[in-house]
Amino acid sequence: MTKRDLVVRISKETGVIQQDVYTVIQKTLDYITEALVKGETIEFRDFGVFEVCTRKPRIGRNPNKPENVVQIPARKIVKFKAGKVMKAKVLQS
């Protein structure tokens, strides 16, 4: 499902014009991104939690030339943990 698919579906179900639905979805995504950049955790009850974690530095190797060692630096990543209701619904399908 794409953002466009989501906009069309919500617009049909609610009767709100697509441009307004798109604006709300885009603003929501912008605010989530903004909070993650600040290092905040985003929690939607029963849906899931987005949080920023730091991946430790590690050594990487090219499988074709294992003698070449590359140092991979630490970096921040976004981690998502599904909520209880979402897990249950996915497992049922």
Image (spheres, helix red, strand yellow):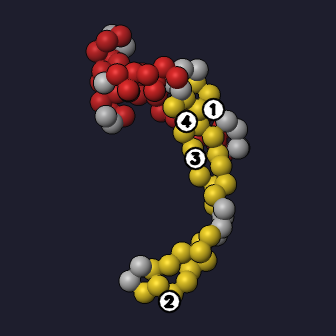
Local SS, label 2: strand
Mark 4 sits on what residue? 81
Mark 1 sits on what residue? 42
Q: Is residue 17 left or right of residue 85?
A: left
Q: Position of residue 64 (x, y in %)?
A: 38, 83
Q: Residue at x 48, y 20 (%)?
A: 85
Q: Residue at x 43, y 22 (%)?
A: 88
Labels 4 and 1: the sequence-earlier one: 1
Mark 2 sits on what residue? 67
Q: Nearer the viewer, mark 2 or mark 4?
A: 2
Q: Is residue 45 above or below residue 76?
A: above
* Spatial separation of the CA atoms under disc 2 and disc 4: 37 Å
* Spatial separation of the CA atoms under disc 2 and disc 1: 42 Å
48 and 12: which is toward the camera = 48
Q: Which disc, if any, is residue 78? A: 3
Picture quarter with the N terminus: top left
User: What type is the residue that disc 1 sits on?
Assistant: Ile
- Badge 4 vs badge 3, beta-carbon distance below 8 Å: no
Q: What is the crowding at mark 2: few (fewer than 14 residues within 10 Å), some, or many (at least 20)? A: few
User: What type is the residue that disc 4 sits on?
Assistant: Lys
* Spatial separation of the CA atoms under disc 4 and disc 3: 10 Å
Q: Position of residue 47 (x, y in %)?
A: 51, 24
> Is residue 19 something one can see in this rendering?
no
Labels 2 and 1: the sequence-earlier one: 1
Q: Quadrant of residue 36?
A: top right
Q: Position of residue 20 (x, y in %)?
A: 42, 21
> Is residue 86 something one can see in this rendering?
yes
Q: Nearer the viewer, mark 2 or mark 1?
A: 2
Labels 3 and 1: the sequence-earlier one: 1
